[in-house]
Amino acid sequence: MKNQTSPYLLQHQGHPVEWYPWCEEAFERAAKEDKPVFLSIGYSTCHWCHVMAHENFEDEEVAKELNRHFISVKVDREERPDIDSIYMTACVLFTGSGGWPASLFLTPDRKPFYAGTYFPRESAYGRIGFLDLLRALHKSWEQDRQKLTESARELIEQMKAVQDTEKSSLSWQHLSLQAVRQFKGSFDEAYGGFGDAPKFPMAHNLMFLMEYYRVNRDRRALEMAEKTLMQMYRGGIFDHIGGGFSRYSTDRYFLVPHFEKMLYDNALLLMAYTQAYSVTGKEIYRQVARKTAQYIQREMTDSGGGFYSAQDADSQGEEGKYYVFACEEITSLLGNSAGRKFNEYFNITREGNFEGKSIPNRLHKENAEEIVYSAAGSGGCRLGPNGENAEGTIYSASIHRLNGKNAKEILYSGGREEYSHTEPERLLSKVYAYRRQRYQLFLDDKILTSWNGLMIGAFARMYRIFGQDSYLRQAKSACEFLEKQAGKKDILFVSCRRGRCQGTGFLEDYAFYGFGLIELYGACLEQRYLELAEHYCERAMELFADKEKGGFFLYGTENEPLIAPSKETYDGAVPSGNSVMAYNLVKLWQITGKEEWRKQAERQLDFLSFFAEQYPAGQSFSLLAALLYQNPPEHIVAVLKEEKDLKKLQKLYGKDADIVALWEETEEYERINHRATLYICREGSCRPPVNL
């Protein structure tokens, strides 16, 4: 384990458990010694992974049982999404739900025969403890192995059955309408978001709703997106002190988060708030995006330009300790007068809203008593009700009576609040500096190609809309980092940490990085980024495409073959690789005009329409791609002459249009009057060329 690059694996190298990484040696030993394999899947910032490790893997008695009767394998789900996908599917089939830590027991030929998530050390309240489970499974392995292996065989057959799909008979317009209706049906009118607690940002759902509004002028779609964006900003899920968003809200109010911060959430939310500003022009959305970008630049960016993966929820073994404050801390730091104003502004109270202390928030109350939340862990990181990834503790939020009165609803003014530089806002830097030196957060400093692709796309979009040069520099720097690591091998890596890169890229690596490159080209119009985007999308088609049934497999011809094929199509915590590929193919066709990209885009949308018909709201990024396909932006070919022409072109058309910038005349595109000339087309109709 000591030679691994994964922070998650390195966290376990000192355990008394004899851990192996996923490798041939582990399974060969299992076969030779006739032992089952215990497979533990998690990631470095998962709270319940830490809990299970402390209760079980650091325990000498548990370790003795594991070492004597099992071969133990530890996997970082972020470095091996293929293993995580296959065995999480098995976990869901076994138990009806899944999450992290994932705990599975396999035959030496890698077939799962038992699965679960978090297990406490001791059995209690009708739930089996890990020690008792190990003893029971060892007994079954010795005495009733045929039953276990038959169960594993049946599961594998079920997983290998490739679902036949056919193009939906419903139009994408109808599927989009159905998705919007589903979102309307589950929308929380009082507090934003969809469904009950826990609530996840699911920024791509909001991006779809805003695009649906732009195309169809459905005001309700925009209202749902705006209310959710405003509630998330005002709640504790947004870090008002240091910027950035936590993983999800444990309550319906977006007040008490699961405190870990993930790069992919913040990338997607940056895009959502940037889009909201573009659609509405409201300054508050720009400010939320700005603060989130500052957080990424300050705490999540490697000196080489790449972006780190995550920050932990725990400090000194306590979840959220880094983020919460007592009233007295603030008044002691800022002085009584400024401290009281700061506490009032950010709702930091003596009673607190999280285990006796306060999560700073801007959920303004109008004649309402305090709302107090009890955080009671339900035991385990789980998948959400629709299968979305839900890392971390699930909490219950209850409203208590104070002074014998019922707590009233939190009321706020939707998107109408204007951002202002109040005294508390000006004091944030001092409170932030104090918080940084008070406790430490664990940083998962591995750099994942897929998540970096999303963040490159986010910074590129911010540059297009806000015009701030630092955003473009950030996107280019991350791109240069990834290209340097890829070198001349023509294969993307999965992760890189402290100069060591490993793993042959999966579909998400190619799809998400391709997305980032397309966005980066749209921001700066430098041809090399478009060429790179085309190259990696072509490679994705070579490595992962199912040429018979359509769609893309998660792992490809140059990855390790696993026990079953896997195609991910559901847009959960992040959009699926298949959805993002659909978006990429549509954009490449619209930018380049190449017929092959159009054919591939249509084929991919036909494939995804089957899944969109089954559950439209679970295909928001596919729906975005379809909306884009059916409602293309203005297409401009610009024959430029001087550098100032490019800046003028970007200022006038860069926010919305697809632009191809040429510096040399062609037979088809010439300069008129010896000046920079634009050829503008929209909806199949082209205007006469005009000078810029």
Image (cartoon, rainbow, N blue to C red):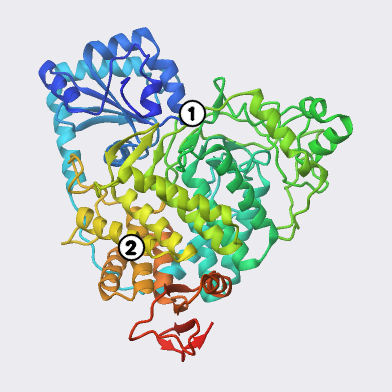
- Which type of secondary structure does the marked residue at label 2 adopt? helix
Q: Nearer the viewer, residue 553 or 456?
A: 456
Q: Is residue 92 visible?
A: yes
Marks 1/2 in contact by CB < 8 Å: the verdict is: no
| 2 lies above or below 285 | above
* Front-most of residues 380 and 273: 273
Q: Position of residue 526 (x, y in %)?
A: 42, 64
Work out whether residue 585 or residue 252 is closer to the camera in this orientation and state it. 585
Inspect this view and state whether residue 387 appears: no
Q: How many residues crowd mark 1 within 10 Å: few (<14), some (14–19), many (20+)?
A: many
Name the residue nearer the viewer: 324 or 185: 324
Image quarter hosting the C terminus = bottom right
Residue type indicated by callout 2: Glu
Q: Which residue is mark 2?
A: 531
- Taking 454 as reference, is 648 above or below it? below
* Figure quadrant of residue 369: top right
| Residue type, label 1 | His
Residue 525 falls left or right of residue 22:
right
Q: Which residue is identified by label 1?
A: 47
Crowding around mark 2 (Cα neighbors within 10 Å: few <14, some 14 to 19, many 20+) is: some
- In percent of width and height, residue 613 lies at 35, 65
Task: Answer above or below: position of 398 versus 413.
Answer: above
**In which quadrant will I find the N terminus?**
top left
Q: Which residue: 36% across, 63% down?
A: 584
Residue at the extreme bottom of the image, as rendered: 688
Q: Residue at x 32, y 14 (%)?
A: 17
